[in-house]
């Protein structure tokens, strides 16, 4: 007997759709997440009517639901693991009501379990413009005893069985976004992080590909947890040939204990799919993040070029030399001067002082006013480094409040970089931090905080002996929000020993991230490529560092260092007083070029490619490629006597394009017949050369014979 008139819920984006099947007394079944279906299309039949029961299976067919749970006889990973002192261990939804929060776009499913006395509110929203799906779960304990929650997925997504690989990121300090590809098989794929922060080594996101998917073509799926703490994701093969993908916060024992009447809300799961390969997916994530960023004044202004003092002088910050640095920075065209670590009470090295957030009286006897006035008089904004969530054992704060550090009574305090983590979930600790930072912001025109976090949480024991990983993240967000409310004109950079806290969660409060402490341009090529999969270029801190690079010892020419940083939120991290006249002139030219291009680089789409033979490229353009900037980076010498042309598959094959090489003023000309050709000389003129889009897309743009670690930059405009 077939199910009479099954009911479906459909959400449509521009290029993707989602279909759920409502079943009375159960959680809705997943029917589709993928390609955009025509309006009005539905599955035509209830899922259970379309498939037979396997032999020796439970007599009730159990397809994948939006919240599969253990107690229904679901043998896959459960979206919920919980119990009450060992009881109510097997939940099963007994009711579901649908509440449309934005008709056709967003809804909340109210699931209830009358037996275990739980409710789950699962919100699902598909953004019609970006095709980004956001899921979030809130579990309510309606029972009269405590519920111990071990796992609650923010969302459970279906993936078609033809998916064959998952790309995620590994890494470490100074090597973030290390790409890693695993085949999808019948074995469970799982990644989890218990470091208490987003982490360098396990980015909370992944991309699942189908066979043949490339950077620009093919179906791909992506998901990211908007959270700066512990996380877990699993992809599991199911017996009907598809996969389920669950993503949520990894809860330490006890963190999910819900008193009667209490509830827990997961971080948001941000997901999307695209038929335009990895770059199509990236465009969706970029659009979603741009929608979320909360800019002072309501809109992003051109990203000011930075000078960050860290690698220039490290802890050795004294007003005289720092003022000289500022003067030299302004002469380069720098717009924001950021005083990094080393400015506060007793901070002469990394073994002391975190927590004592007032200017060091020996270094700055008159406080920061003189320096800030000097910076402002040069036409630059002033930014300041802080690391609020930390405390040094050798600090006035720790001596006064040793109990404010996260710790477990009876166990040793575990330091990292000689520091401990402050329990900022204590109101008195976060009030202290607010007062100290607010005092600085109120007293000075500080427009920017570089907010650092230089260690993992271990062990995150709260004062009452319970685990505080989750509390710590929520308290950090609350402190950032409180400061932003009090000082709405201040921007925040999320730094965590480089890229240890880069996620959509912290980016509700922050406006830039420090991608990595490694500024070696060659290393940055791969890291930035990975970064751009989820995050747009305008928030990607990208600096020109010294040569040799401090973290690798490798030396690259100024042009290569600047070209690699060009597309990001551009900055300089060296002592500008030490630059030779030639280097200073060249850098000034690159800064001017960046300023000329940043509007183009920081809006619209990014296409990324590896053409083989050591060539990496990026194209930043509006969505229909009418106007773009091409950055080609050669990371190693060509294997060819004459390098192959570079195909630009995203260009419109029906259009013609003008290609003009862009070179900063004063950059040395190419010399010698091995490195020049009339075609390139023609490009390097105001008119450039005009070529058919079809030619550029199919055959390619001729590439010059160029040495390793050089760049080629061009404006490509439709004519
Ligand atoms: C780690 C950051 O990533 C660096 O940029 C710098 O701010 C140092 N911390 C300062 O201690």
Image (cartoon, grey):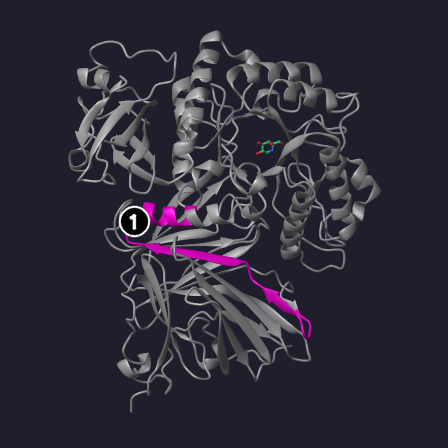
Near-viewer residue (493 or 201)? 493
- From the top left corner, tell me how far across and down residue 266 is, in percent: 56, 62
User: Relative to residue 282, is residue 315 drawn left or right?
Assistant: right
Q: Is residue 222 above or below residue 611?
A: below
Residue 226 in sight in this render: yes
User: Relative to residue 130, is residue 569 drawn left or right?
Assistant: right
Near-viewer residue (18 or 404)? 18
Q: In this view, does 354 lie above or below 54?
A: above
Q: How crowded is mark 1: few (under 14 residues within 10 Å), some or many (20 or more)?
A: many
**Residue at left 61%, top 20%?**
313
User: Outermost residue toward the bottom?
Assistant: 1
User: Relative to residue 497, is residue 445 drawn left or right?
Assistant: right
Residue 52 in sight in this render: no
Please name the residue that numbered disc 1 is placed on.
277
- From the top left corner, tell me how far across and down residue 664 is, in percent: 38, 17
Is residue 47 highlighted in magenta?
Answer: no
Query: For the residue with label 1, is its CB less than 8 Å from the closest atom of ligand 1?
Result: no
User: Outermost residue toward the right?
Assistant: 400
The quadrant of the picture occupied by the C terminus is: top left
How many numbered marks, from 0 up? 1
The quadrant of the picture occupied by the N terminus is: bottom left
- From the top left corner, tell me how far across and down residue 621 is, in percent: 33, 37
SS type, badge 1? helix
- From the top left corner, tell me how far across and down residue 534 is, in percent: 42, 46
Near-viewer residue (457 or 268)? 268
Question: Which residues fall within the magenta stretch?
Answer: 258-286
Ligand 1 picture quarter = top right
**Residue at left 42%, top 32%?**
599
**Residue at left 77%, top 47%?**
431
Q: In this view, does 58 lie above or below 566?
A: below
């Amino acid at each position: 007997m077939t199910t009479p008139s099954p009911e479906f819920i459909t959400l449509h984006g521009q290029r993707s759709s989602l279909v759920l099947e409502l079943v009375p007394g159960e959680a809705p079944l997943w029917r589709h997440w993928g390609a955009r279906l025509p309006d009005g299309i539905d599955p035509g039949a209830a899922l259970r009517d379309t498939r037979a029961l396997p032999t020796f299976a439970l007599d009730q067919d159990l397809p994948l639901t939006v919240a599969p749970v253990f107690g229904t006889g679901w043998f896959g990973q459960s979206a919920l693991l919980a119990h009450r002192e060992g009881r109510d261990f097997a939940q099963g939804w007994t009711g579901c009501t649908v509440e449309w929060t934005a008709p056709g776009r967003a809804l909340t499913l109210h699931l209830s379990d009358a037996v275990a006395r739980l409710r789950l509110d699962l919100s699902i929203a598909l953004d019609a413009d970006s095709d980004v799906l956001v899921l979030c779960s809130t579990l309510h304990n309606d029972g009269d005893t405590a519920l111990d929650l071990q796992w609650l997925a923010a969302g459970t997504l279906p993936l078609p069985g033809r998916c064959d690989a998952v790309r995620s990121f590994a890494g470490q300090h100074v090597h973030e976004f290390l790409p890693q590809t695993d085949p999808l098989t019948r074995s469970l794929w799982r990644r989890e992080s218990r470091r208490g922060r987003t982490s360098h080594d396990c980015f909370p996101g992944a991309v699942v590909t189908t066979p043949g998917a490339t950077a620009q073509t093919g179906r791909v799926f992506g998901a990211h947890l908007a959270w700066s703490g512990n996380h877990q994701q699993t992809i599991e093969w199911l017996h009907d040939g598809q996969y389920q993908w669950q993503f949520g916060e990894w809860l330490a024992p006890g963190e999910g204990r819900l008193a009667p009447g209490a509830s827990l809300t997961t971080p948001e799961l941000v997901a999307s799919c695209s038929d335009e390969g990895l770059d199509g997916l990236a465009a969706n994530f970029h659009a979603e993040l741009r929608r979320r960023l909360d800019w002072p004044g309501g809109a992003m202004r051109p990203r000011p070029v930075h000078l960050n003092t860290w690698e220039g002088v490290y802890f050795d910050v004294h007003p005289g030399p720092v003022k000289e640095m500022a003067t030299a920075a302004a002469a380069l065209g720098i717009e924001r001067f950021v005083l990094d670590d080393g400015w506060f009470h007793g901070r002469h090295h990394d073994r002391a002082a975190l927590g004592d957030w007032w200017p060091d009286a020996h270094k700055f006897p008159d406080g920061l006013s003189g320096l800030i006035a000097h910076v402002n008089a040069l036409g630059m904004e002033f930014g300041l480094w802080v690391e609020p969530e930390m405390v040094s054992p050798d600090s006035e704060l720790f001596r006064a409040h040793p109990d404010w550090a996260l710790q477990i009574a009876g166990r040793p305090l575990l330091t990292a970089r000689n520091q401990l983590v402050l329990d900022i979930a204590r109101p008195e600790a976060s009030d202290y931090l607010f007062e100290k930072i607010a005092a600085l912001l109120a007293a000075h025109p500080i427009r920017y905080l570089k907010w650092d976090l230089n260690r993992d949480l271990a062990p995150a024991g709260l004062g009452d002996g319970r685990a505080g990983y989750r509390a710590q993240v929520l308290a950090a967000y609350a402190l950032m929000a409180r400061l932003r409310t009090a000082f709405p004109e201040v921007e925040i950079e999320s730094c965590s020993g480089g890229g240890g806290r880069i996620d959509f969660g912290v980016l509700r409060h922050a406006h830039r991230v420090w991608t990595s402490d490694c500024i070696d341009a060659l290393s940055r090529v791969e890291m930035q490529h990975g970064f751009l999969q989820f995050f747009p270029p305008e928030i990607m801190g990208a600096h020109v560092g010294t040569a040799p690079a401090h973290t690798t010892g490798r030396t690259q020419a100024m042009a290569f260092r600047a070209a690699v940083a060009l597309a990001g939120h551009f900055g300089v991290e060296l002592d500008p007083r030490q630059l030779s006249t030639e280097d200073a002139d060249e850098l000034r030219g690159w800064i001017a070029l960046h300023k000329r291009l940043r509007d183009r680089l920081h809006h619209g789409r990014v296409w990324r490619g590896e053409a083989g033979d050591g060539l990496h490229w990026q194209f930043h353009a509006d969505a229909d490629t009418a106007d773009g900037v091409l950055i080609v980076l050669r990371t190693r010498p060509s294997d060819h006597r004459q390098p192959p042309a570079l195909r630009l598959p995203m260009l419109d094959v029906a259009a013609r394009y003008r290609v003009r090489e862009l070179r900063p003023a004063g950059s040395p000309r190419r010399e010698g017949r091995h490195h020049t050709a009339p075609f390139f000389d023609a490009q390097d003129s105001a008119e450039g050369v005009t070529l058919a889009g079809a030619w550029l897309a199919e055959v390619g743009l001729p590439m010059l014979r160029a040495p390793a670690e050089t760049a080629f930059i061009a404006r490509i405009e439709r004519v």
